[in-house]
Amino acid sequence: MEYDGLYQDLHEATVMMVDDEPTTIDVLQTFLETEGYKRFITTSESIHAMDLIISENPDVLLLDLHMPQVTGFDILARLRGDQRYRHIPVIVLTSATDSETKLKALQLGATDFLGKPVDPSELALRLRNTLAAKAYQDRLTFYDTLTGLPNRRLFLDRLVWSLRCAKRDGTSGAVLHVALDHFQKINDTLGHAIGDSLLIAVSNRLLESLPPVASGGAESQVVLSRVGGDEFNILLPEMARIESAVEIARSLLQALKEPFKVNDSEIFISGSIGVAVYPNDGDICDTLLKHAGIAMNQAKHRGRDTYEFYSANMNARALERLSVENQLRRALERDELFAVYQPKVDIKTGHVLGAEVLLRWHHPERGSISPVEFIPLAEEIGLIVPFGEWILRAACKQNKAWQLAGLTKIRVAVNVSARQFRDGQFIQTLVNSLEISKLDPQYLTLELTENTIMGNAQENLDVLHQIKEMGIKLSVDDFGTGYSSLSYLTQLPLDELKIDRSFIKGIQSETDDAPIVTAIVAMARSLNLRVVMEGVETQCQLQFSRDRGCDEYQGFLFSEPVPSAEFALLLVQN
């Protein structure tokens, strides 16, 4: 399936002719057929012209000016007064030679003129030039500049057409809303150039996975459209059975599972798909697209890499999510965010050596909102940067307060999102937080994931060195779940590795993960890095971590994340 224009060949264009002389129409159509044109709409009764234009939406109009009842001037005026049809090119056919007639037609929006009797060669030339100009303008107007796919405007045009045909013929169709999972992380870690290349590759993969364009008219054609960012819409018209949408959704998800080759690197990504069927789920564009989007969000909430069909009860959940989103946007100004601290403990002595500070949200009506619910939402709607700044300032200020109270000096560790790390103001944010709190930089640790560090590696290395020169400690969070290059890891100015909790989850004794943990600890030792085991909840897991040579641990076995006052008591006991 290719999208090189509204028609791949100029001769595939639909030519409409309106002339009160049927003989003229017959002569012109015969000639155009010899020139290779195949699609015609004709009428010698100008009173029906606008109805035909609305129902058939031609690519070009050959229009006689002087006709009874409804003149060519009348039709021109109605065309240019209707937003939907004002850009259809109109070649005027007229036997008038006076400048007044031509000027009036031009003022009403005529594209070109042909004098009667029409010269066939001149008609062929003017028609070709007009259609070529329209094809170029259509590409600018109706196609996405990055992928070459139809844009939202063209998709809506096709959807309106298909809905009208479905209502007329009693048929069904579907709209699929496809969104890539975690695409923002690609942009944040690898850069927008890689992200754009990936979008092009995804577009091509999706096209290859869709059914070929039907041989019928526009109402029977599958349409793939990029509607913005990492989201696509697919129109499946004239479905004989609903299972067709299921099969295509599964095919698309399977196609996305194969790695994408971008700049000699393999990138893995998945998608979430929402399906709305018409006319059951809506018979107007806005409703149908809204319902497909709601179903897509439900697919994401179910764990991503899946598809969901719209159902009425999704509306309530969608409204609830919108409410949470609106309230989250005001959480900062309403002072509803707060910090909790989870101890990082010396694995040999049991002394508290530090704390990981975590963000929490207390809603005035709903109470505590799980970070699993609001942190991904904050990332999605762009709040993760201001939230990150807030928790950084709070952590620095609290640690300095503990020190002024005479408590044990510890390091507080703050998680840094990929988007925050790539923000051009991140270094200045660090400087401001330390200056305002007057905290010595050595008592602040920044935790970054492998993917954040390794994406756009050279640029990130420069930022990491700037942070290190400030005296701040650096830790790799969730180590073992990303795609670190061990050779590159040796170049990073790191202080600590935190082994992801997945390596000890469910441990009873020796497991298949034991050699991996042993290898990670050995590597860390060779790089002079401390090792922290995350998620320790049982004595068995603690002993496993101690036997592997970890330096510190954190987890519910010692303490869950607690408010600052409770953490201060732990420091007093320490």
Image: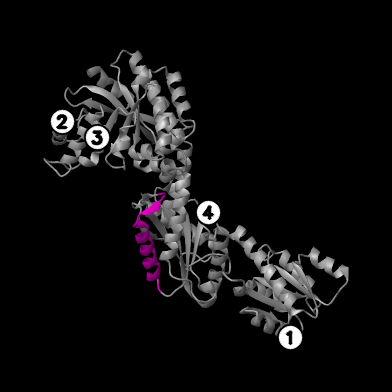
User: Which residue occupies the foreground of this view, 1 or 430?
Assistant: 1
> Which tag, 4 or 2, sits closer to the chain's start?
4
> Which tag, 1 or 2, sits closer to the chain's start?
1
| SS at circle 3 | loop
**Residue 546, label in figure:** 2
On the image, the x and y values in percent for residue 449 come to 34, 37
**Considering only vertical position in the picture, is 298 above or below 395?**
below
In front: label 4 or label 3: 4
Disc 3 residue type (three-letter):
Glu
| SS at circle 4 | loop
Residue range of the region highlighted in magenta in the rendering: 241-263
Q: Which residue is mark 4?
A: 146
On the image, the x and y values in percent for residue 132 come to 65, 66
Q: Which residue is mark 1?
A: 22
State the scheme by which the image is colored: one colour
Q: Which residue is mark 3?
A: 534
Q: Residues within 10 Å of mark 4 (few under 14, many from 20)?
A: few
> Which tag, 3 or 1, sits closer to the chain's start?
1
User: Which residue occupies the foreground of this view, 563 or 257?
Assistant: 257
Magenta stretch, overall SS: helix
The C terminus - image quarter:
top left
| SS at circle 1 | helix
On the image, the x and y values in percent for residue 365 come to 41, 38
What separation in Å lies between label 1 and label 4 (alpha carbons)? 46 Å
